[in-house]
């Protein structure tokens, strides 16, 4: 039996280089392994915890879908779908809610961070927290447990959510016998921290990202904004602590990386490094950028692909949910 590898991306912002290196690229590589069945999806109902503008949510969801496809996802091999097209996930979310202690949710990092922020600003603990945000980990557990995922590739910040999914599954299994499969997480260690424009981790919340599919002129401008120190061109530079080098390494050939490492040792101007970084990045992005443009201009095509994927996902979800409901004591004739 093939192992199921499952991951989701929330449509809450433009996909950036950090998303690509940290999540999409490793997931696409895993998808090539013959012994894995990948299931990758757009977590649009998770997006709804934050995005309440109809048009924005729709465009961001199409954006995530077009990004995966433009970067090489093959929908004939990957179960590729939109969470909101699988109603079984929401039935399961309720079931799981009844096996999730409220305390477990209170301890979830994302919620705790909001509470801490409210405390700091001397507001009510739960100011601005909707129930979707509070129970976010249960919906995520349903995503994972519904498709009986074995492996979930995620960023470090999501590890706790996988642990919560395991906890909930164990409570359920304890009551009804071995039913829900406990997932393992897989964190891409070496690529976990792609630096952003300011040198901190590239992340939407820091507003320091380089979006993947922007106009080359804009790409160039953003690269020029990447923070460097003020060493003169002739001074030897440290490649291991350089954001530019870290980014370059991900997109350049091994030969190019070696030659850049040497340039750092012998002295090179930051301007030259930036020009080289633009060159390798743009070389990589050129083709997917065109594909992305095409796809985003044909939402019907995207819908068609995603609905086919939803059908595939439901061929697993529908019978499995039936089995769960039978175990719980609902009549499923
Ligand atoms: N919470 C994840 C994130 O913000 C997105 C997500 C939703 C997800 N459901 C999932 C990831 C299931 C892996 C598996 O990145």
Image (tube, grey):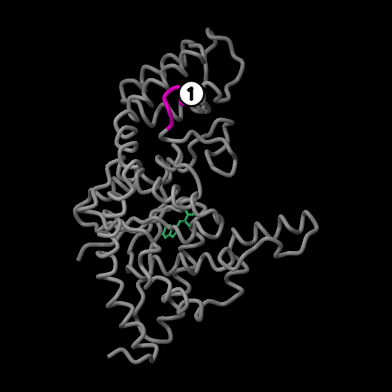
Residue 87, quarter of picture: bottom left
Return the x and y of residue 295 as percentages of the image width and height: 31, 42
Q: Nearer the viewer, residue 300 or 47?
A: 300
Query: At numbered mark 1, what does the secondary structure look like: helix, strand or loop?
Result: loop
Q: Residue furthest top?
A: 234
Return the x and y of residue 248 as percentages of the image width and height: 42, 26
Return the x and y of residue 127 as percentages of the image width and height: 71, 62
Question: Number of labelled discs?
Answer: 1
Q: Residue at x 28, y 65 (%)?
A: 313
Residue 85 vertical placement versus 173 (above, below): above
Q: Nearer the viewer, residue 252 or 119?
A: 119
Residue 188 vertical placement versus 223 (above, below): below
From the image, which quarter does the N terminus lie in? Answer: bottom left
Residue 160 vertical placement versus 180 (above, below): above
Verify whether residue 26 appears in magenta: no
Residue 13 vertical placement versus 273 (above, below): below
Chief SS of the magenta region: helix
Q: Residue at x 45, y 39 (%)?
A: 16
| Crowd tier of the residue under label 1, counting other residues whose Cα lies within 10 Å: few below 14, some 14–19, many 20 or above | some
Residue with the mark numbered 1: 239
Q: Nearer the viewer, residue 306 or 224?
A: 306
Return the x and y of residue 269 as percentages of the image width and height: 51, 11
From the image, which quarter does the C terminus lie in? Answer: bottom left
Residue 174, quarter of picture: bottom left
Q: Residue at x 40, y 63 (%)?
A: 84
Q: Is residue 303 left or right of residue 91?
A: left
Where on the image, by quarter, is ligand 1? bottom left
Span shown in magenta: 214-220
Q: Residue furthest right?
A: 122
């Amino acid at each position: 039996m093939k192992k199921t590898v499952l991951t989701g991306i929330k449509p809450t912002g433009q996909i950036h280089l950090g998303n690509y290196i940290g999540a999409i690229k490793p997931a696409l590589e895993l998808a090539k392994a013959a012994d894995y069945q990948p299931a990758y999806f757009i977590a649009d109902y998770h997006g709804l915890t934050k995005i309440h503008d109809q048009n924005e949510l729709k465009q961001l969801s199409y954006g995530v879908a077009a990004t995966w496809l433009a970067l090489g996802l093959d929908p004939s091999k990957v179960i590729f779908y939109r969470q909101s097209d699988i109603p079984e996930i929401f039935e399961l979310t309720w079931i799981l809610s009844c096996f999730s202690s409220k305390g477990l949710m209170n301890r979830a990092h994302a919620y705790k961070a909001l509470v801490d922020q409210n405390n700091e600003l001397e507001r009510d603990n739960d100011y601005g927290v909707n129930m979707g945000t509070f129970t976010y980990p249960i919906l995520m557990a349903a995503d994972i447990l519904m498709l009986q995922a074995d492996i979930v590739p995620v960023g470090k910040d999501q590890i706790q959510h996988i642990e919560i999914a395991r906890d909930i599954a164990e409570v359920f299994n304890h009551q009804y016998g071995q039913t829900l499969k406990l997932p393992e997480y897989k964190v891409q260690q070496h690529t976990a921290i792609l630096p952003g424009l300011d040198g901190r981790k590239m992340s939407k919340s820091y507003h320091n990202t380089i979006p993947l599919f922007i106009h080359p002129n804009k790409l160039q401008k953003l690269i020029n904004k990447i923070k460097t120190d003020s060493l003169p061109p002739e001074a030897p530079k440290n490649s291991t602590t350089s954001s530019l080098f870290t980014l370059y390494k991900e997109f350049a050939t091994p030969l190019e990386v070696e030659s850049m490492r040497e340039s750092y040792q012998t002295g090179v101007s930051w301007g030259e490094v930036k020009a080289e970084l633009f060159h390798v990045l743009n070389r990589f992005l050129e083709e997917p950028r065109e594909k992305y443009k095409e796809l985003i201009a044909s939402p019907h095509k995207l819908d068609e692909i995603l609905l086919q994927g939803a059908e595939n996902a439901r061929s697993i979800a529908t019978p499995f949910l039936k089995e769960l409901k039978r175990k719980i004591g609902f009549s499923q004739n």
